[in-house]
Amino acid sequence: MFTKLTSWSLSRDTRQRVLLVTFACCAASPAAVHAVGTAAGTNITSAATVEYSIGGTSATITSNTTTLAVAELINVTIALQSPTISVAAGAPNKALLFLVTNTGNGLEKFSLTGESVLVGDDFDPTPAAPFIYFDSDGSGDLSPADAPYVAGSNDPQLAADSGVGVLLVNNIPAGLADGGYGRSQLTATSTTGTGAPGTVLAGLGNGGVDAVIGSSGGQVARLGSYQVGDILLSAVKSQAVQDPFGGSQPIPGATITYQIVVTTTGTGTALGAAFKDPIPASTTYVAGSLRLNGATLTDPIDGDVGSFELGPARVAVSLGDLTTATGPQTIDFRVTIN
Amino acid sequence: MSNRTTVLRLAMLAAALGGATTALAQTADRGCIELKTVAEVQETYVDARGNEATRLVPAAKVVPGDEVIWTIVANNVCTTPAGDIAITNPVPEHMRYVGSSAFGPGSQIVFSLDGNTFAAPDALVVAEADGTRRTARADEYSAIRWVLPRPMGPSESMMVRYRATVL
């Protein structure tokens, strides 16, 4: 869900209204690491042995085998994947991304509900219809491939330790003042049951084993936030060609230096602004050439804000939260013509 | 508490755990030591005076994260003393031993990483992938052994215990 500040859109529109320059920090990933534990229905067995000797003769005796049945633990977490999202007043279909994870030890189905009329914020976002979507394509944002959630019809059934990306989609009311916050909440509820931690639901677990409510109580809710800002980001891209013969002809082997200047105007904060630029066809990125405000950024996705990624080849720079006080941000990188 | 009292109490405990203490000699195939394994969990309850207290109750079902208290009781059911006594218990599959939880009155406790060789905790060494060596962590133990350095007399019982967490 990067807002595309590509060379093409930017060269045509030097001032692009950026409604949403936040970026998803993480695609919904079922690989989130949880120590999920022994599967429901497993039998744990134990037997001891004793060795001894009587009158010089040794013997070994084994005890009874004690068996413990592992019940189904019902637990669920929701992690908010979106940062606070910058929105313009009146903007439609703004999505918050959550990751719902089954942290129990069995296969479990969860129902989902959303709520946007909440206390403690400045405005109430208006739920879109449908309100809840699965992030089916893993894009982190609402896209045509995303399936709407229909309660009781496609409740997510999650294997132990697996998760699903869920989008809460709200429309932002018109006429809001800059800086105001609006919150929206996603709730996931085990369809097997809820209750105080430790509650036993006899026979309701996977395969007829008992189910035990875990620390979540079988239900969990998580808030996401929008912030109103009337902020404009503009980007101007320029290029300089240097050929191998000291000239400026765009011939194979020539180097193109691209420079992009991102400027912020208006009020409010562009939260989590991200710059992303595909490497043009028939050119090759010059390794290690990406810079932000003159400082070199390393190519791997690592501790610094910049990276070069493949598939498709592109450079990306996380500019962070931008206001007019931040000043222009200058990005440059080089490619060679193949 | 004298040794005699300890033995008596253990005998009572063994009886309470269901181990029948008989002094009759057994046939060779049944052996002279009866061995019983019991799994329990600690339960918090409110006693008659309204105070919170804990007690051990049989572990019927468990969930990941539960701590189980395993008790092993050995009775010498023969009329002659039994020597060279060693009780061995593999840490059950799907469980992890809780460090420092093993105890057994009068016995030496040793641990194993591979289930075959046993040693005191500081003598158990793990080789890391990079070649460095370190002392094994308690959660890496795969078996526990209690060695009783004295013979067990007729009708005598011993109890050993450890705790393990469901993974």
Image (cartoon, coloured by chain):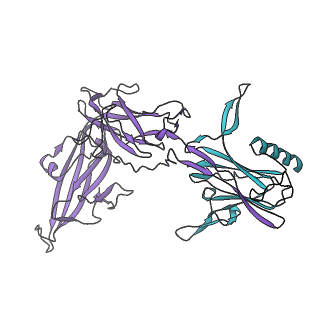
Q: Where is A119 relative to A37, above or below?
A: above
The quarter holding residue B78 reads: bottom right
In this image, A100 relative to B113: left or right? left
Residue B129 position (above or below residue A182): below
**Along the line of sight, the residue nearer the viewer: B149 or A263:** B149
Describe residue A319's horizontal placement relative to residue A37 as left or right. Answer: left
Who's the residue at 50% across and 49% down the image? Answer: A35
Which chain is represented by cyan in the image? B
Task: Give me the chain that's purple.
Answer: A
Looking at the image, is B43 positioned above or below residue A299?
above
Q: Which one is in front, B135 or A231? A: B135
| Residue B92 location (% of width, % of height) | 61, 53
A246 relative to A185 in the view: left or right: left
Q: Quadrant of residue A234?
A: top left
Q: Position of residue A33 (x, y in %)?
A: 45, 50
User: Visible in this render: residue B1?
Assistant: no
Residue A158 x, y percent position in the rendering = 40, 42
